[in-house]
Amino acid sequence: MSLPAADEQILQQIFAGNRRALSRLITRVENGGAALVPLLSSLYTRTGKAYRIGITGPPGAGKSTLTNKLAKSFRAENLTVAIIAVDPTSPFTGGALLGDRVRMSDIMLDGGIFIRSMATRGNLGGLSEKASEVAGVLDAAGFDVVIFETVGVGQSELDIVSAADTTLVVLVPESGDAIQAMKAGLMEIADVFVMNKSDHAESDKAVHALLTSIGFRDHNETTWLPNVVKAVGTTGAGIREIRAEIEKHKAHLESRGLLVVKRLERERRFVKAAIEEKWRTAFWSGEREAELTKLLSEKLSPYEISERLTQNGF
Amino acid sequence: MSLPAADEQILQQIFAGNRRALSRLITRVENGGAALVPLLSSLYTRTGKAYRIGITGPPGAGKSTLTNKLAKSFRAENLTVAIIAVDPTSPFTGGALLGDRVRMSDIMLDGGIFIRSMATRGNLGGLSEKASEVAGVLDAAGFDVVIFETVGVGQSELDIVSAADTTLVVLVPESGDAIQAMKAGLMEIADVFVMNKSDHAESDKAVHALLTSIGFRDHNETTWLPNVVKAVGTTGAGIREIRAEIEKHKAHLESRGLLVVKRLERERRFVKAAIEEKWRTAFWSGEREAELTKLLSEKLSPYEISERLTQNGF
């Protein structure tokens, strides 16, 4: 499939490391539209090299500081890093307005790190698909590592990080019960737990409790059971151990062919969401919307309306 | 449409106030299935009398205590109340395990109050549709007021409460910036704000700040701008004022024909979700899933796969 010259030029710019061209393309991806399909299809053939890491946890767990330190540790090995931040509490996305959070300006000045924030409001339905497409673009653009950072409060945020190759869940020992409650969905998606701010007195107790609860899970010798790594984001303590756990998880996936399976599952979900979106647009024509309005005004039950609107198929 | 005798019997039991029959039907609604359609269609003709109130806010804002007190205030006027709790931090749904939360046993013993909890995990996608269906059943069963209580952390929880006739957003003055961040989605759906725990010293400042930010919204003389009511859930202070604001909002909706519009919109969304679910089941046959698997294994881009799978329509 040959591309329009304008698209071909964009590809060349992106492969040459032009960050403005990359940013512009990502904005187009966020806005969506069929015109992008040939370009994205072409980029797709270049994906599969980046390792995708999801980082999530409750607000205030120190995810951004850890992301920062982790990015630097990859940079120390000359690996390039792209960060996709979908987190209203993150300084990447403007959360810095909210308080005295760590400044990211040091890593923002590093040419081997690319940071992109994505909005959580307005397009929530398709947010995880958009994030996945953006990750694909960054992968094709040659980044070695793509990190998703989101706050673990909603299903769509969890969908984003759990689509990564390895998902880190960041917790803190002092979390109150409100935070505990929000963790429910977080516990299931973790490949690695990070107990951050572990210079805190309660830290060992919290780690122990977490390890105990993980040990209760059904498992056999081939199951991956998440380990718990103690860290102090502000000092960088534990970053080496986190990296080691990520490597261990990656090796686990690769040795069993599970990385391929996981990525195919991710694409399967992506295709399904894309088809669903196409169907929605095709089905809900102006005419059908009008018919729905009419049937609603006739006080038919939603069940009958749904029967009538689909009696001739979808 | 005549109903099977068994269904007819269930209806008679429910209209006679049989709470066990009601609970069993709600469980069937939660489990879903086409067999329920005639029964639900029949119930639908009896809906429209209950006033639906949504109560949401960040964890720890005291939503359950307020819900409890509000339910009692309706009971004092001999109105019956059904509470649908979709909130992992609520004592209704087992949140009491998490700490020293208020006990609900006093209202649980009141025959004019029916409490039902719904799970947030597992079926998140369809949760707001299920909650809406359950509300319809409770409405048809004759409850005067249906209250949805959810924690305001995810899109699907917000969808549930914002489908109510009047939505209360409960905040507390001392909320930290993590909580502030989560409020983003909450601010837009509020018809009434409740500043709970307002015996706190910071309370007036917080109310003032909130009122100021509301005042900045685009509005004209017909726009409903949410008011902020100070309350102390534990003592019941402010409950009368909350009731008054709910009445004011209801009168606002009714006088402009907006209540009808709002309810039609709710049904429209419901019908759309139901049709989407039907389409999904119909489209993703085993054969098509297999085709998807095959195309994925051929390393085609998701865009091409989505084109191929839909080239003969949906």
Image (cartoon, coloured by chain):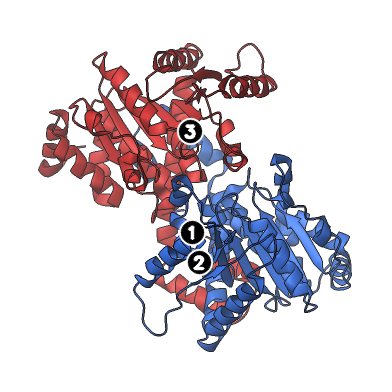
Chain colours: A red, B blue
Residue labelled with disc 2: B190
Residue lying farthest to the bottom in this orientation: B255
Q: Locate residue B231, reporting x and y percent.
A: 60, 66
Q: Locate residue B245, reporting x and y percent.
A: 58, 77
For the residues labelled 1 and 3, the Cα–Cα distance comes to: 25 Å
Instruction: Tell me the quarter of the picture where residue B97 sits.
Output: top right
Horizontal side, residue A207 vs residue B188: left or right: right
Q: Chain of mark 3?
A: A
Q: Chain of mark 2?
A: B
Residue labelled with disc 1: B186
The kind of residue on which mark 2 rests is Ala
Residue labelled with disc 3: A162
Q: Are marks 1 and 2 in contact (CB under 8 Å)?
A: yes
Residue shown at 29%/21% (left/top)?
A72
Is residue B248 depicted above or below A183 in this figure?
below
Instruction: Tell me the quarter of the picture where residue A92 sits.
Output: top left
For the residues labelled 1 and 2, the Cα–Cα distance comes to: 7 Å
